[in-house]
Amino acid sequence: MVRNTKNEYWENMLLLQEQDRERLAEELHDNIISQLNLIRLNLNDKKPEELNRDLKKSMQLIRELSHNLTPPDLDEIELEDLIADYLDQVNKSIEVIFRHITIRTPISNPVKLNLFRILQELMTNILKHAEATRVEVSLRISQNYLILTIEDNGRGFIVETHSGGIGLRNIQSRAQKIKAIYKLKTEPEKGTKFIACMAIQ
């Protein structure tokens, strides 16, 4: 039984690493490389200030990607502060409202990291695809449970047509790893709401 549990753990770890690599490759190809190619093609047609603006935008994307890949120092920060720091950066691109009701219950580092990565995945999808103008994030921690909610006012989507995407698979794997249950509610033109809940042990 112990051996099976260890095997499952390492299989999940390898799966998450592979999904992260796929997501990184997709992000590099779809965003950064395509933007740099556009800059190269327009070198002779655009004004220097326009090229400078485009380069700054590409540099910002690279910084965000680097930040997303760097594990935070989980021992030194509470989950609500980790989320608040990240959302402060996102708030420059979209209106973000963060509400939290928490008590000082110890949260393990694996739980912190996986919930944080789930939040990052959802926010990346919102910024790239949802065309939302507002996101509300809620964190509730009691002695017995934790609930994380992310809701946007974007264009929504049909879950069935996106269920095989890297982002949703990544969220599913990370939720399973920390024994969290989650629900994704969305319809075209009606926004998206994600709720994750887990017991605190």
Image (cartoon, grey):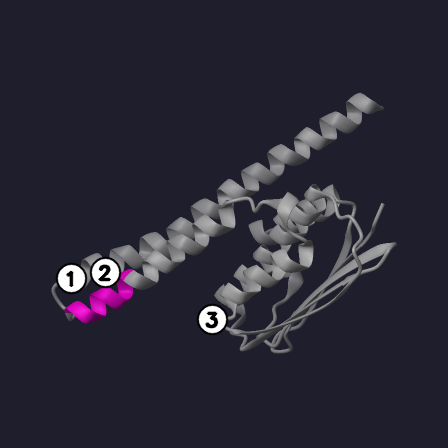
Instruction: Kindly indicate whether the residue at mark 2 contacts the one at mark 1 (C-beta within 8 angstroms).
Output: yes
Which structural element holds mark 1? loop
The magenta segment is 48-55
Nearest the camera: 43 or 48? 48
Q: Determine which residue is flagged by label 1.
A: 43
**Magenta residue check for 51:** yes
For residue 110, which quarter of the picture?
top right
Would residue 30 be visible to someone looking at this image?
A: no
- Front one among 110 and 128: 110
Q: Characterize the local packing of mark 2: few (<14), some (14-19) or many (20 or more) Cα atoms within 10 angstroms.
A: some
Seen at 44% across and 45% down, the residue is: 25
Q: Could one spot residue 41 in this view of the protein?
A: yes
Report the disc number at residue 93. Answer: 3
- For the residues labelled 3 and 2, the Cα–Cα distance comes to 22 Å
Q: Residues within 10 Å of mark 1 (few under 14, many from 20)?
A: few
How far apart are the alpha carbons under marks 1 and 2? 6 Å
- Give the mark, 3 or 2, whose residue is nearer the N terminus: 2
Q: Amino acid at mark 3?
A: Ser
Q: Is residue 162 magenta?
A: no
**183 lies above or below 10:** below
Q: Quadrant of residue 41?
A: bottom left
Position of 141 relative to 176 (above/below): below
**Residue that mark 2 sits on:** 39
Quarter of the rendering containing residue 103:
bottom right
Residue located at (39% from left, 57% from top) = 61
